[in-house]
Image (cartoon, helix red, strand yellow):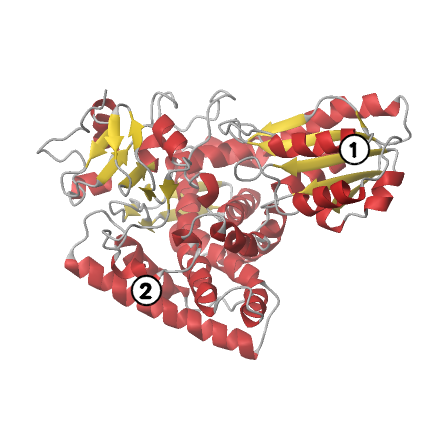
Amino acid sequence: MSMPAHQTSEALLPWRNPAFRANPFPWYDVLRREAPVYQDPSSPKTYNLSRYHDVAQFGKHPAMSNVAPDWVQRGPWGMFRDSVIVKDPPEHTALRRISNHWFTPKLARQWAEAATEEVNRVLDGLGPSGLTEAFRNLALMPSHHAMCRALGLPNDGYDTGSDYMRDAMIGLGAAISAEEEERCQVALTYLLDRVDHYLAEARKNPQPGAVSSWIELAANGTITDRQLREALLLFWASATPNAAYLITGGMEIFARQPEVLELWRTSPEKHPAILNEIARLHTAEMSIERFTTAPIEIHGVSIPAGSHIRFLIASANRDPEVFHDPHRFDLDRPAETPPHLSFGLGAHFCPGTNISLAETSAVFDTIAARVKRVELAGVPIYGHDDRSARYLRLPVRLVM
Amino acid sequence: MTNIYFGTESGNSEMAADDIGAEMEQLDRAARIIPMESADIAELAQQEFVILVTSTYGDGELPETTQPFYDALKARRPDLSNLRFAAFGLGDSTYETYGNGIDTLSRLMIELGARQVGDTGRHDAARNEPVAAVAKRWTQAIVPQVADSVTV
């Protein structure tokens, strides 16, 4: 029997409420319990899935497409017309392979040496009190250096680039204002201009790395110029802030639970478990979306073809049905615990996963080798919106 | 010297092959890691023992670099009756097609006369266990079974 989705005049996902944006987890708890297939009153063709098993199962369901139907207002991000984020297999597979070649786990470790170098430079330049701002100095910029090494691009220009990327990501929110949309437009226009600049430079003076190879693929017609520009925008601009959130999350855990840094230092076999748990608790992209290509039924709710499904990844990652005591950093979760979903799932699994994990390991290895303790030197400042989680500042004192 | 052939979509099988090779070195067995896309089928057929590593892609298909290796074996149909092989697969048990990649490849090897040594190793991405740990355990189980009758 088909049942109506949970509908109520009270919004269970108050997208613009500052308390919700700062800490959505109490709302997610209600949603998982009372409305696991939640039809958004502000957007009736949108269904929100919040339980781990639903997200894991339907996130890779064959009826879920990345291609938006005509009714969807795509806003400034509608400029993406021909890249992995708006294509389904087999076209998606062909494009994805072009980038996969440059971001294998093995190559990622090599690129991440640039992150190690940058962290070492920051540590060498610390003042007598060992104070630094961990988000920019130990996470964002080291990761950007690693990404630029992979791409074969100079690593300048990312202070402005990452600021604009924040504006662009806010524009992906569920209920953005006209002002946020305008800022997103300005940001993406700027970022695309930088991409065009770096492509022009790389054509004049090719450097070893992904960009030179992609330029050749564009020249021989394997990919289009549009695909080249969109791919570079994704890798150069949008990938690194997510990795930086993961790394900074780890730094905050090192400060609050010093035994975790000690474990990183002494027990390399624990590294995968530490990375998994940090990533589970720090879901940079808290939701992802898909569109149904056929009618489906979830928990008795009939969802027509052409609907918009929002998968609440951050909620799934803290579903107590799957992760006992879900807000706790716990390295002893049973081996049969399913994986966190912070890097997404299915064919659209984050192409930056390998480099992001390699950057994180490189930063933590360098900190573990040179720093005795990480202490908070002020209150962390977060800048979450309804879709992306981020740090603005993590003031730390590094005790050498 | 044991040839370890790996086929991959995003590089995880390469890491597994490296982990297996490193564990073999620990056990005093030399290993050579060969990407399947640059494998020489004639050379493969002359070996006594090889290790195959592949993931599964999409709906149970072979990944990008396993496919041409599989296609070449299928087209040339070398006599593999003197070859023994061990197989290690990477997959995700939340898919119905879990492990299809390595099973498809193993079936073809057996069809061509090769005999499998030991159980197929399987890393399951749906479980909270690193590839390196699973690959190491599997290698430790496989190597003694090979050493009995073949010079590794």
User: Which disc number belongs to residue A281?
Assistant: none
Q: Quadrant of the N terminus of chain B?
A: top right
Percent of width and height locating residue A200: 49, 77
Q: CA distance from mark 2 to mark 1?
A: 50 Å
User: Which disc number belongs to residue A188?
Assistant: 2
Q: Are marks 2 and 1 in contact (CB under 8 Å)?
A: no
User: Which disc number belongs to residue B24?
Assistant: 1
Q: Chain of mark 2?
A: A
Percent of width and height locating residue A262: 52, 34
Left or right? Give the position of A130 relative to A305: right
Q: Amino acid at mark 1?
A: Met
Taking the image as drawn, is residue A125 in sight?
no
Percent of width and height locating residue B59: 52, 36
Q: Quadrant of the C terminus of chain B?
A: top right
* SS at circle 1: helix
Left or right? Give the position of B81 relative to A362: right
Left or right? Give the position of A1 relative to A212: left
Percent of width and height locating residue B112: 80, 33
Q: Is residue A81 above or below residue B144?
A: below
Q: Residues within 10 Å of mark 2 (few under 14, many from 20)?
A: many
Q: Amino acid at mark 2?
A: Leu
